[in-house]
Image: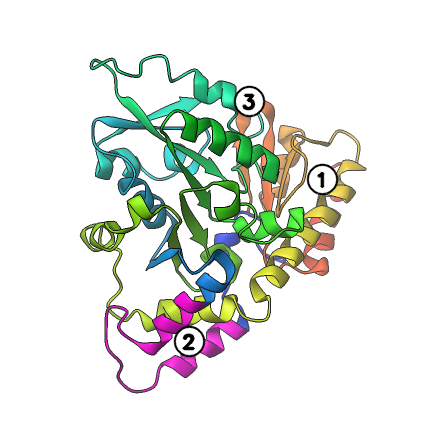
């Protein structure tokens, strides 16, 4: 393959600064399970961004972050409202329902966003013992279609949900990309906007591995560490998770990485939109480009490039840029797209 993959930002390597900090932490012995000074420093960094009252638990992966946070919010007879394309519904192997025992109530969405009307649709059975009782709403920022909720949209959802006694969870696997797009702080679209529980992503933004559960609701915080342990997400050598986040949240590395990935996606989308027979299917608001092109061209491009066919019925593909995607990578892909017309 002549270019980097556009299949997923999970396919990218580790940012050099993150690799260096892991190596520096690999010195001597320190207390296990988060009792070390590296973890203390990482949690301090999180609190600088999200506030001193936030509760932070580091975990291994995004599914672990989502399930840990949701399990603190929902009991087995209760339900979580989300879009049909939400990662917890479509890409986590039923982990949320499997571990929590509750039910996912889905809403169809063309752009990945959940709306108040979509939430309202699942509220007519509150109090009916025959039906799973809604207790949480889960939104993704960015969405699985790369779209970004505005701060106003998030506030509308949290206000509506809280009025009905529902918690609001945010899958923030690409939260940094959303902040880069909106030009806002991490707090403005989470704790300040009324989010109760956040899964904060690191793996897709330059880390080797690691996500964080960040809780803003004191009612939910006390059980998190026990849920994390029972869910097999407590790292014994926690320092190697912690140092990655401490470095990511220093000197705006998280933001620089996200801005670069977004910028590469924007350049890719702009050039693709100029070509005949190719159309963008979603606005490009983060590091993902969704585009429709003839099936024959898709097959030809797949001979050299790795990307996801998102919707076969619409001949829609997804192209994802990363912190290490270069202008050359974009140009190489575009050159092969142009050749595919012949």
Which residue is label 3 attached to? Answer: 313
Please tell me whether mark 3 or mark 1 is closer to you in this view.
3
Residue 317: which numbered mark, if any?
none
Q: Identify the image quadrant of the C terminus.
A: top right
Q: Was residue 39 drawn as part of the magenta stretch in this picture?
A: yes
Left or right for 68, reference 185: left
Q: What element carries label 3?
A: helix
The earlier-in-sequence mark between 3 and 1 is: 3
Mark 2 or mark 1: which is in front? Answer: 2
Q: What element carries label 2?
A: helix
Lower position in the chain sequence, tag 2 or tag 1:
2
The secondary structure that dominates the magenta segment is helix
The residue carrying pointer 2 sits among few (fewer than 14), some (14 to 19) or many (20 or more) residues within 10 Å by Cα, namely: some
Q: In this view, does 134 lie to the left or right of 186?
A: left
Q: Quadrant of residue 34?
A: bottom left
Tell me the distance, in whole angstroms, between the alpha carbons under discs 2 and 1. 42 Å
Residue position for label 1? 340
Which mark is nearer the camera, 3 or 2?
Answer: 2
Q: Can residue 68 be seen in this view?
A: no
Q: Mark 2 points at which residue?
A: 22
| Residue in the image at 31% along x and 16% along y | 126
Task: Name the residue located 59 percent from the left edge and 24 percent from the top edge.
Answer: 314
Q: Position of residue 107 (x, y in %)?
A: 45, 22
Q: Which residue lies furthest to the bottom in this view?
A: 28
Query: From mark 3 to mark 2, how far is it between C-alphas?
Result: 44 Å
The stretch in magenta equals 17-44
């Amino acid at each position: 393959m002549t270019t980097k993959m556009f299949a997923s930002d999970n396919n990218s390597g580790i940012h050099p600064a993150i690799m260096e900090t892991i190596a520096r932490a690999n010195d001597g012995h320190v207390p296990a399970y988060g009792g070390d000074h590296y973890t203390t420093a990482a949690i301090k960094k999180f609190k600088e961004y999200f506030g001193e009252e936030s509760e932070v638990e580091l975990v291994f992966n995004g599914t672990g972050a989502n399930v840990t946070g949701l399990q603190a919010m929902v009991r087995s007879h209760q339900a979580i409202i989300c879009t049909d394309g939400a990662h917890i519904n479509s890409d986590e192997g039923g982990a949320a329902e499997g571990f929590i025992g509750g039910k996912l109530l889905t809403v169809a969405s063309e752009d990945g966003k959940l709306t108040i009307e979509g939430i309202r649709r699942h509220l007519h059975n509150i109090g009916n013992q025959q039906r799973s009782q809604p207790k949480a709403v889960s939104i993704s920022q960015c969405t699985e279609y790369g779209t970004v909720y505005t701060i106003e949209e998030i506030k509308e959802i949290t206000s509506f949900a809280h009025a009905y006694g529902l918690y609001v969870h945010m899958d923030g696997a690409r939260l940094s990309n959303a902040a880069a797009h909106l030009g806002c702080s991490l707090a403005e679209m989470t704790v300040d906007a009324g989010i109760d529980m956040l899964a904060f992503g690191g793996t897709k933004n330059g880390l080797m591995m690691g996500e964080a559960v960040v809780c803003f609701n004191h009612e939910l915080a006390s059980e998190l560490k026990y849920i994390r342990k029972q869910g097999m997400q407590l790292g014994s050598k926690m320092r190697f998770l912690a140092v990655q986040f401490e470095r990511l949240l220093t000197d705006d590395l998280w933001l620089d990485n996200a801005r670069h990935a977004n910028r590469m996606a924007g350049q890719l989308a702009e050039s693709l939109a100029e070509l005949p027979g190719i159309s963008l299917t979603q606005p490009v608001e983060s590091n993902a480009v969704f585009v429709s092109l003839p099936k024959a061209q898709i097959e030809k491009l797949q001979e050299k490039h790795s990307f996801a066919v998102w919707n076969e019925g619409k001949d829609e593909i997804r192209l994802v840029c990363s912190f290490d995607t270069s202008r050359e990578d974009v140009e190489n892909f575009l050159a092969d797209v142009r050749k595919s017309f012949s």
